[in-house]
Image: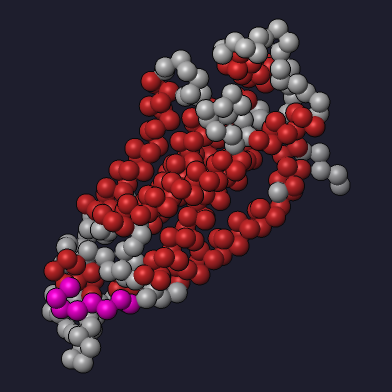
Amino acid sequence: MAIQSTGCKLALSHKQDWLILVLLGAIEGVLNIIEPFHRYIGKDMMADLMFPFKEDTIPMWAVPIYSIVIPIFIFVAFYLVRKDIYDLHHAILGLMFASLITGVITDSIKDAVGRPRPNFFLRCFPDKIPVFDVDTGDVLCSGDAKVIKEGYKSFPSGHTSWSFAGLGFLTWYLSGKVRVFDRRGHIAKLCISLFPLLIASLVGVSRVDDYWHHWTDVFAGGLIGLTVSTICYLLLFPFPTLSKGWAPHAFFHMLGENGCSYQRENLNPHDPRSGDMSMEMEMDDVESGIISK
């Protein structure tokens, strides 16, 4: 049976990418199962690891909801307005790549470094009675094995890296869609675009406030997530500062293959406003259905 849907054809043309996503997901699962490196923790190192052990303000199950699910809802909302399947497909693909690549990098470093969390003492000694090996001086934990395992995963912060990966990608996406850099000085557009980064930053702050991470863990996690999300976005979309920053590269490639021209003969190429005027006319054509996708 021939596949008629443009969306299905587009997804099939990127089947290798989707298969890599599955592989990344499997690697991420393995990284969460294996035991992290148990870094040496002597008695004189406990002073910085005796913070309260309490529940997360933001549980781990909530991270994919606000960093992946909510951005996808926003992508779908733009699709319902623009009817641009290229934009929807590439936005979801880029978001998933940003999230999973960040997850693999973060958890690989976590397992390799084995840095203890600020609340490690109470994880290791829930009865508050410290015990150390008489020969090595290393801790001899008496707590729950799973709780202790997580205690060696402080660096970098997974909550923060995942947040900046998903919400960082969303910031780039919104910047292009609302045309923040159209040189018209609409501060409201900038606020809309930066709002996801504010949420990601507050998530990072909560990790320090909950004593699950050192501030350096959060800083490193945010840097990893934002870097990966930026790379993934720019692989699929133009810079938001460009006149064609509102649609993915694939959309313009499709138009080029179909012989569509975006230049208007009546626009003066020496007029600095020509790029903005052309961009407005392009988007008007898309919205009115003159240019089909």
Q: Residue at x 28, y 56 (%)?
A: 216
Magenta segment: does it hold 25?
no
Q: Quarter of the image containing the C terminus?
A: top right
Residue shown at 54% from the left, 66% from the top? 27
Q: Position of residue 89 (x, y in %)?
A: 64, 40
Q: Position of residue 179 (x, y in %)?
A: 51, 23
Give whichever of 70, 287 is nearer the camera.
287
In the image, 179: left or right of 280? left
Q: Identify whether 181 is placed above or below 11.
A: above
Residue farthest along the front direction in this orientation: 270
Indicate whether 187 appears above or below 48: above
Q: Start and end of the magenta stretch?
A: 38-45
Helix, strand or loop for the magenta stretch, by majority: loop
Location of residue 170 in the rendering, given as x and y in whole percent from the top left corner: 48, 38
Q: Is residue 190 left or right of residue 291?
A: left
Q: Is residue 277 visible?
A: no
- Total numbered labels: 0
Instruction: Name above or below for residue 279 compared with residue 250.
Output: above
199 or 76: nearer the viewer: 199
**Horizontal and vertical percent position of residue 51:** 16, 63
Residue drawn at x 49%, y 36% is 172
Which color scheme is applied? secondary structure
- Relative to residue 247, is residue 171 drawn left or right? left
Is residue 180 something one can see in this rendering?
yes
Towards the viewer: 251 or 289: 251
Residue 40 in magenta?
yes
The residue positioned 13% from the left and 69% from the top of the image is 47
| As drawn, 202 above or below 40 | above
Residue 36 or 7: which is nearer the viewer? 36
